[in-house]
Image (cartoon, rainbow, N blue to C red):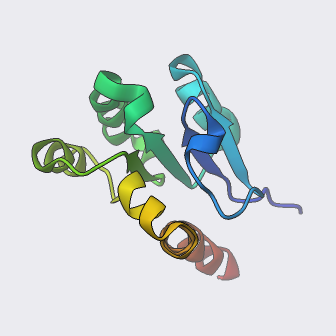
């Protein structure tokens, strides 16, 4: 039996706006209306939401992701241009596991971005690999 690759869904208007050190198993969605159909179709293990692109709709998307048991296995990450204490606190309560800030990534682009996305994939894919081994 063949299993599907674990995929990371990136929701952003421009795929080049978020630096990802790898392209394999990454699917870009550039329309808010395609987020949930893409999740149902691809069944990703993780999703990166571009806060600057989604804006005020981020809260609605997160509430839908965290309230429906179908989405419970998806790790949620948020890409933002800069930190904001109140907004980040709300997004954390709504289910965001980690933030990826553009300001930090630009300062040490290759090193920090690679580490952050490495962490994202390790956190997302390692438990799934362990589950399939049993």
Residue sitting nearer the eye, 71 or 85: 85
The residue at the point 36 percent across, 45 percent down is 81
Residue furthest toward the right? 1
**Residue 51 in view:** yes
- The image position of residue 28, as x and y in percent, is 66, 38
- The answer to which image quadrant residue 29 occupies is top right
The residue at the point 69 percent across, 34 percent down is 41
**In this rendering, is residue 85 above or below 2?**
above
Residue furthest toward the top? 33
- The image position of residue 45, as x and y in percent, is 57, 55
The residue at the point 54 percent across, 34 percent down is 12
Quarter containing the C terminus: bottom right
**In this rendering, is residue 74 above or below 108?**
above
- The image position of residue 34, as x and y in percent, is 59, 22
**Residue 100 in view:** no
**In this rendering, is residue 40 above or below 26?**
above
- The image position of residue 56, as x and y in percent, is 28, 23
In this rendering, position of residue 118 left or right of residue 83: right
- The answer to which image quadrant residue 105 occupies is bottom left
**In this rendering, is residue 55 above or below 46?**
above
In this rendering, position of residue 118 left or right of residue 72: right
Residue sitting nearer the eye, 63 or 92: 92
Residue sitting nearer the eye, 73 or 58: 58
Residue furthest toward the front? 107
């Amino acid at each position: 039996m063949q299993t599907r690759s674990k995929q990371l869904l990136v929701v952003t208007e421009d795929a080049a706006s978020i630096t990802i050190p790898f392209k394999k198993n990454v699917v870009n969605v550039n329309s808010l209306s395609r987020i949930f159909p893409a999740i149902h179709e691809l069944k990703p293990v993780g999703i990166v939401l571009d806060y600057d692109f989604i804006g005020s709709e981020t809260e609605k998307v997160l509430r839908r992701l965290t309230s429906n048991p179908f989405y419970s296995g998806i790790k949620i990450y948020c890409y933002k241009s800069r930190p904001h204490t109140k907004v980040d606190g709300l997004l954390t309560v709504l289910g965001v596991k980690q933030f990826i800030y553009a300001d930090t990534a630009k300062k040490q682009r290759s090193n920090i971005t690679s580490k952050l996305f490495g962490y994202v994939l390790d956190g997302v894919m390692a438990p799934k690999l362990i589950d399939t081994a049993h």
